[in-house]
Every structure is written in C-alpha cells, then in structure tokens.
Amino acid sequence: MPLKNYGVLKGRAIDRKLGEGSTPHYQVLISDGNTKYRIAINVKSKLSPSELLYFVQENFDHPIIDDLTQLDLGFNRLDRKPGGVALDFIRGNLFDPTQMKPLPHNVPGPDNDLNELIELYIERSLNSDDATVYAFGERWGPETDVKDKYFGFLPGNGIHDIHMNQGNDAQFKKDNGVWQDGGLLIHYASRNQWVGIFLAFQSQSFHTDDTTGNRIDTAIPTPSAAVRIVAALVNPRDEDKGKETVVLINTSPSPVDLNGWALADRLKRKFSLQGTINPGDVLKVALTKSSIDLENQGSIITLLDKEGLKIDGVSYTKEDAQKQGWTILF
C-alpha cells in the first residue's frame, strides 16, 4: 500500500532540533507564512545496519526545478506518477544511487555524522532571508487539539517519511510505492543554488517493481550493467522529431545483446533497441518519429534491459537543451 497523503511542503525554515534518543529524527520547523509545520527527517534506521545511506548534491539541477518554483507555499499534494514533480530515486534520474554512502547519526567530534550534515544546510537556510525548503514525504495532521511536541505550535502537523519509500524489507512493505520517495531540496536564491539531500535505508532494495514498488532481489547481471548513456542530441536543427539521437557505450570487456532493451522518456514511453554493442564500442541510436519524446523543456532518458530493469538514467534541463544542434554530454 503506498503512502496515503504524499506531497511536498514548500516554506521557510525558522527553527530546528538535532535528532536524539533511540529513534532520532532531525526536526525542522517550517512556516509558509500562515501555517507552521514540522518536518521529521530520519537519521537512524530501526533495522540493522542502523546507518542511513545519504547523497547530497550541492548543485542539484533537474527538470523538476522549474515546476517546483511555480508551486504555492504550504503543502502541495502530488500525483504519484511520472511527468510531474513527484520523486522516485530509481525512475526519476535524480542522482546516481550507487553514490549513496552510509553515515552514523551521532559521532563525537564536528562535521562527521548525519545530524551535522543536515544541520549544515538547514542552518544556512535559517540565516538566509530568501532560502526556500521543499520537503517531500507524507503529511500528518492537522491535529486540532494536539500541540506539536517539539516546537509547541497548534495545530500539530507536518511531514515525515522524508526518505526512499520503496524496496522496503517485509516489515515495512506496506509503505512501498513508486513515485512517492521523500527528499529535501533547498533553494538558496541569493546564491543561485539548489541543494538536494536524499536518504535511504540500507535494508531497502534499489530494484523494485514498476507498479507496486516492492523489492526485486534479482541482481542485474554483468556486463549488462556496464552499458551507459553518455550523450544525447535532444534539439537538432530543423524539425526535431525523428532526428534526435542517444549515444550508448559498453564499458565492459564482453558484448551485450540489446534485443528486448528499450529507452524510455519521462512519461515512460519506450523506444525498442536491437542488435549487439561490442566491448568498448559506442552506439548512436536514431529515434524515429513515432518513438519517445526528448522535450526541449528538460526531461529524463532511461535505459531498460529486457526484464524492464533500469540499467542507467540521465536528466537534462531546459537550459541544456537550448543550443540547437548541440549534443549534451552526461
């Protein structure tokens, strides 16, 4: 069963408390100008190993940014589907999940644990008059007669599950779903900077069912996993359709059979691949007029194997696509 009330809270951070206790959460008080909310960010897992996986992108750049800036302040409920601003760590090509690393929540000394990592960016937002926080997750409340237990405001309400919400162990399988991952984005307008903070539990799987979000424990075989998207021409000269190209490379020492594989766009439309790509070779795939749409407003491109599992994925922005006739390198 997916999350019941998934969305993104847009507002300004006005206070925070570091995570403490047996199930610590880093707490942030957010205001949209009228209503207060508390966002609770997990910094320790209930399951072993207890260290969360994290990835921070200090110059986050993705097509969803333009849409996020158009959202109203406050909580915005999101449709759990591709093509919008809902997050999916696997399908949304937000970042490379293999770059996530484990980090303890509380270690003696400065700047060496997850509490302090989140504190770095939240404190910066507290000291910035024009910093906007976007917290993705599940909303709770409003609890009309219950004051918030950390910041004392009434009615109590906020956002939790600000982490990956699919591929869970059996104990938390009920929370699985696609296009409903949590995350934290912070826009520091005066610095022209977006920071993305993404968290996952080590007990979760990064291969999940496209419909349920339940874990798929079958590993992607080598050398298939070594095929990568390295470039794309998304805005060719003259008419776009039928002239876009995507370039693949096989970095492995073995040939890879691409029959049954596909490229997919942000709306999950697919273009079937054929043939074999030899070791070290690159393959330029010409997209036909009836295939996927590489939009000039920014989009994602995903490489799927014959089982439908994601092998690689990239994203590009509107700015990347503005130079007509130029190929984008990933």
Image: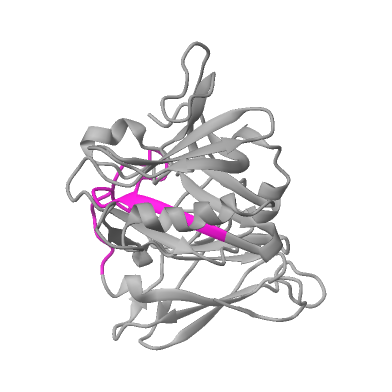
Indicate the quadrant where residue 193 lies: bottom right
State the residue at coordinates (50%, 56%).
121
Q: In the displayed structure, would residue 168 be above or below residue 287?
A: above
Magenta includes 215?
yes
Magenta includes 220?
yes
Region in magenta: 195-221
Residue 251 in percent (x, y) is at 37, 83
Total numbered circles? 0
Identity of the residue furthest to the left in this view: 48
Indicate the quadrant where residue 280 lies: bottom left
State the residue at coordinates (29%, 58%).
103
Q: In the displayed structure, would residue 75 be above or below residue 259?
A: above
Q: In the displayed structure, would residue 243 be above or below residue 96?
A: below
Q: How is the image coloured?
A: one colour
Q: Main secondary structure of the magenta part?
A: loop
- The residue lying toward the viewer, choosing from 21 and 235, is 21
Residue 268 appears in the rendering: no
Determine whether, in the image, residue 171 is placed left or right of residue 189: left
- The residue lying toward the viewer, choosing from 192 and 314, is 192
Residue 265 appears in the rendering: yes
Looking at the rendered image, the quarter that the C terminus falls into is bottom right
Q: In the displayed structure, would residue 76 be above or below residue 309?
A: above
Identity of the residue furthest to the top in this view: 145
- The residue lying toward the viewer, choosing from 232 and 34, is 34
